[in-house]
Image (cartoon, coloured by chain):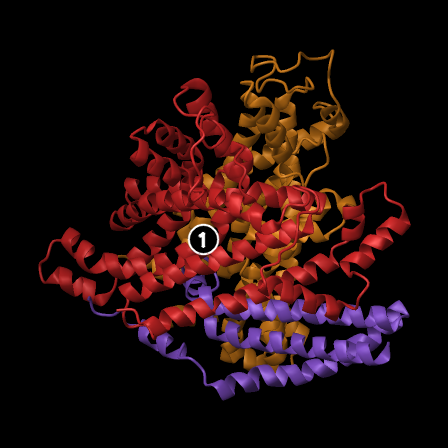
């Protein structure tokens, strides 16, 4: 195999897989914030729609949207992140999309969404 | 590379006009023949569009209503291209030449709207993300990343499915605006971060410059080049994607002289009967316009990219 | 060279991808303005009838109950039945019949794109800034400037109408009725040909495939050749390439030997992503050529509000996209053993 180009090895190191505890901190923190966000969303939606059941449904749907976004984004980043990095670097003007950033932030969004879902479902069941 | 950063810093101090004149970007671009060809094509299309639009308003070209309604009696139906009807006529006896010319106005108009809104939205999101960093940055950019990850046409289709039917062509425009915004946000954020790293910006902030002032005076001007490239490349894409949505039946209102719709009718009704001109000419204009934007955009990107600028050996 | 563990890890990614897509589809379908109960009951149904359908579908339950039920359905592969397009037919049956059609088209298109794009990209890079380079680049840019729904009709006109050498639409001439093994018509007819010694059906199927696949392929070629050019230029400028050249090897041999493999790596990663765009292209191509794959069906389903069909199609798209990117990853780690497995 031919000698490696100079700039690649560092990027490969960055991609090393994170530990389980690190993953849990990232997603878990967002999940807790999401629980709070779910309560707020439910309250606001209930006020706007003047029905607890509809408010809970709306808040839950918001959570589902974020959770789906996050899950798909996380796995999509892992799956096709390298390709996106390369394409950005060559065919686009900006060049700072990195798989790792995206993966981490997606985990946050997903965790937050899950928190909202749980809060909305629990409160919705208790209050109706 | 370090010399380049130096010139960039210097030139930012010198103000916009002189910087443009000295910019290696502009001189590279002007020496790129492909990019020049692109500019020529775009200018030609703009001229055609203005002719059709102003003509429709002043009276030397058919109005939108005339183009939209059938012209039985005035013209033969499905006439092949001739001196009188250079592009032939369609099944409703409408002159395809006039319709195609007006179509360029529609394409440029809605292209401008789509790209304009997504540029504005993308620029604000990108600059804010870069300037405030941290959570703001993460929330904005990751949302953008998710949108960025989908193939554009499929995402646009999904969005079109959500929006109500009554919006007509605006439904497609809104969907595409959402699809394109992330690209601008990403590019602008990258460029803005580079500017913010410069010491002189720190100095201005230390001297008491307000946030909006720093953003408008220092960050925005330095993002202009990448924004222009991105807008140009996306302009071509927007025209294609808008026409594609019209083609699939999610875009222009029935009867509208939009290229996508003419193509759609020409393909579904005229192709197997041999009335090739019906779909050929709208598509030709569409392809040439998009090619113009792609040539220019590609040339600009090369001019921006230092990796492409170094000569071999 | 590629460990089993790596393959397994990548395959496991299918779970979050499909889970995420399913969740997102659930959210989008509930956000969209249409009422499935109204769609099923029909436009003339009374409000009472619609309400009955709603209760029957469980649409009155809280959303989290519906979401849970929905996930259970998906895990057990119970994707429901079509509301409208093929009323009452299970989605799985529809997908099984239609998916191979789109898949076959996309695969041939991708192969043509790669076979054209890579050589063009290399030539363009090696002859940078010559007339050859300019022509190739204009060609590539023209390729992405021409929409599929225009090049499609164009080649139909040229080859089917004027020259009359290739068929314009459908997948095979109507007199043939080949047995279905895989659903991939070129494969089926070929197997049939091997069995019966009669290859007329295969020739017919292959010639029907040529135009649509070429249309998708030319579109795909554009991106691949631009990536290949950029990547090749970068590799050519690497120090070790200059060293190799200074050692006296001929420029062409150097390029072939050292450059190609390294330059190919970024291109391959993009091919995986491009498969998504290609599926979008297949939607348009199928419409133009009158091929009834899942692309045409998706458009129809969105138009009329046949939600189970939309959902099933999107899930299948995501599944395919994941599998293709798995393949890309395997090729990648084969070419570049340095990557962390």
- Which residue appears at 80% of the width and 43% of the height? C42
Q: Colour of chain A?
A: purple
Q: Position of residue B220 (x, y in %)?
A: 59, 65
In the rendered view of the protein, which quadrant contains the C terminus of chain B? Answer: bottom left
- Which residue appears at 57% of the width and 12% of the height? B83
Residue underneath mark 1: C274
Looking at the image, residue C172 lies above or below residue A112: above
- Number of marks in picture: 1
Q: Secondary structure at mark 1?
A: helix
Q: Position of residue B169 (x, y in %)?
A: 71, 42
Q: Colour of chain C?
A: red
Q: Position of residue C8 (x, y in %)?
A: 40, 70
Image quarter for residue A12?
bottom left
Is residue C16 shown left or right of residue B102? Answer: left
Give the chain letter at badge 1: C
Looking at the image, residue B193 lies above or below residue C147: below
């Amino acid at each position: 195999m031919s000698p490696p180009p100079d700039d690649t090895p560092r990027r490969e190191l960055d991609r090393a897989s994170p530990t389980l505890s690190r993953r849990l901190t990232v997603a878990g923190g967002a999940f807790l914030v999401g629980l709070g966000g779910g309560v707020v969303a439910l309250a606001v939606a209930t006020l706007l729609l003047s029905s607890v059941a509809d408010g809970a449904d709306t808040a839950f749907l918001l959570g589902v949207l974020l959770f789906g976004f996050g899950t798909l984004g996380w796995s999509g980043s892992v799956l096709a992140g390298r390709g996106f990095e390369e394409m950005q670097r060559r065919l686009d003007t900006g060049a700072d999309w990195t798989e790792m950033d995206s993966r981490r932030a997606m985990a946050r969004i997903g965790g937050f969404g899950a928190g909202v879902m749980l809060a909305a479902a629990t409160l919705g069941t208790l209050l109706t | 590379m370090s010399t380049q950063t130096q010139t960039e810093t210097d030139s930012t101090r010198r103000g916009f006009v002189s910087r443009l004149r000295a910019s290696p970007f502009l001189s590279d671009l002007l020496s790129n023949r492909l990019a020049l060809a692109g500019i020529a094509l775009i200018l030609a299309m703009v001229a055609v569009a203005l002719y059709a639009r102003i003509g429709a308003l002043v009276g030397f070209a058919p109005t939108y209503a005339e183009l939209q309604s059938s012209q039985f009696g005035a013209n033969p139906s499905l006439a092949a291209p001739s001196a009188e009807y250079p592009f032939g006529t369609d099944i409703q006896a409408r002159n395809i030449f006039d319709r195609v010319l007006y179509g360029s106005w529609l394409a440029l108009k809605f292209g401008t709207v789509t790209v304009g809104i997504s540029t504005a939205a993308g620029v604000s999101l990108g600059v804010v993300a870069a300037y405030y960093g941290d959570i703001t940055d993460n929330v904005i950019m990751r949302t953008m990343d998710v949108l960025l990850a989908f193939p554009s046409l499929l995402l646009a289709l999904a969005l079109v499915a959500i929006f109500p039917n009554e919006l007509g062509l605006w439904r497609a425009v809104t969907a595409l605006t959402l699809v394109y915004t992330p690209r601008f946000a990403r590019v602008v954020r990258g460029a803005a971060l580079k500017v913010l790293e410069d010491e002189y910006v720190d100095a201005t902030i230390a001297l008491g410059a307000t946030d909006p002032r720093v953003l408008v005076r220092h960050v925005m001007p330095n993002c202009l080049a990448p924004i222009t490239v991105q807008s140009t490349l996306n302009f071509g894409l927007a025209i294609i994607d808008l026409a594609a949505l019209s083609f699939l039946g999610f875009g222009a209102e029935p009867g509208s002289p939009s290229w996508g719709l003419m193509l759609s009718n020409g393909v579904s009704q005229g192709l197997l009967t041999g009335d090739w001109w019906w779909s050929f000419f709208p598509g030709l204009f569409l392809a040439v316009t998009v090619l113009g934007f792609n040539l220019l955009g590609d040339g600009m990107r090369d001019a921006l990219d230092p990796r492409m600028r170094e000569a071999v050996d | 060279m590629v460990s089993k563990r790596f393959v397994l890890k990548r395959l496991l990614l299918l779970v979050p991808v499909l889970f995420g897509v399913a969740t997102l589809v659930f959210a989008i379908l509930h956000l969209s303005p249409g009422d499935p109960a109204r769609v099923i009951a029909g436009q003339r149904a009374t409000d009472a009838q619609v309400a009955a359908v709603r209760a029957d579908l469980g649409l009155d339950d809280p959303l989290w109950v519906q979401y849970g039920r929905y996930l259970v359905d998906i895990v057990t592969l119970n994707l429901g039945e079509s509301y409208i397009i093929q009323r009452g037919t299970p989605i799985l049956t529809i997908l099984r019949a239609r998916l191979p059609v789109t898949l076959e088209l996309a695969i041939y298109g991708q192969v043509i794109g790669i076979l054209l794009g890579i050589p063009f990209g290399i030539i363009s890079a090696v002859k940078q800034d010559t007339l050859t380079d300019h022509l190739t680049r204009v060609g590539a840019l023209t390729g992405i400037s021409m929409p599929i729904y225009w090049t499609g009709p164009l080649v139909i006109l040229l080859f089917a109408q004027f020259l009359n050498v290739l068929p314009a639409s459908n997948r095979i001439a109507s007199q043939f009725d080949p047995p279905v093994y895989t659903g991939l018509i070129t494969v089926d007819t070929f197997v049939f040909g091997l069995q019966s010694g009669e290859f007329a059906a295969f020739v017919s199927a292959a010639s029907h495939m040529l135009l649509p696949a070429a249309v998708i392929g030319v579109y795909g070629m554009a991106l691949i050749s631009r990536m290949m050019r950029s990547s090749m230029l970068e590799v050519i400028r690497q120090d070790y390439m200059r060293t190799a050249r200074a050692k006296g090897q001929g420029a062409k041999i150097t390029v072939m030997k050292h450059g190609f493999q390294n330059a190919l790596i970024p291109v391959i990663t993009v091919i995986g992503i491009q498969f998504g765009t290609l599926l979008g292209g297949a939607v348009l191509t199928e419409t133009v050529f009158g091929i009834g794959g899942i692309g045409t069906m998706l458009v129809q389903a969105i138009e009329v509000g046949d939600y189970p069909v939309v959902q099933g199609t999107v899930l299948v798209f995501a599944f395919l996209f994941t599998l293709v990117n798995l393949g890309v990853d395997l090729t990648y780690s084969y070419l570049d053993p340095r990557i962390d497995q």
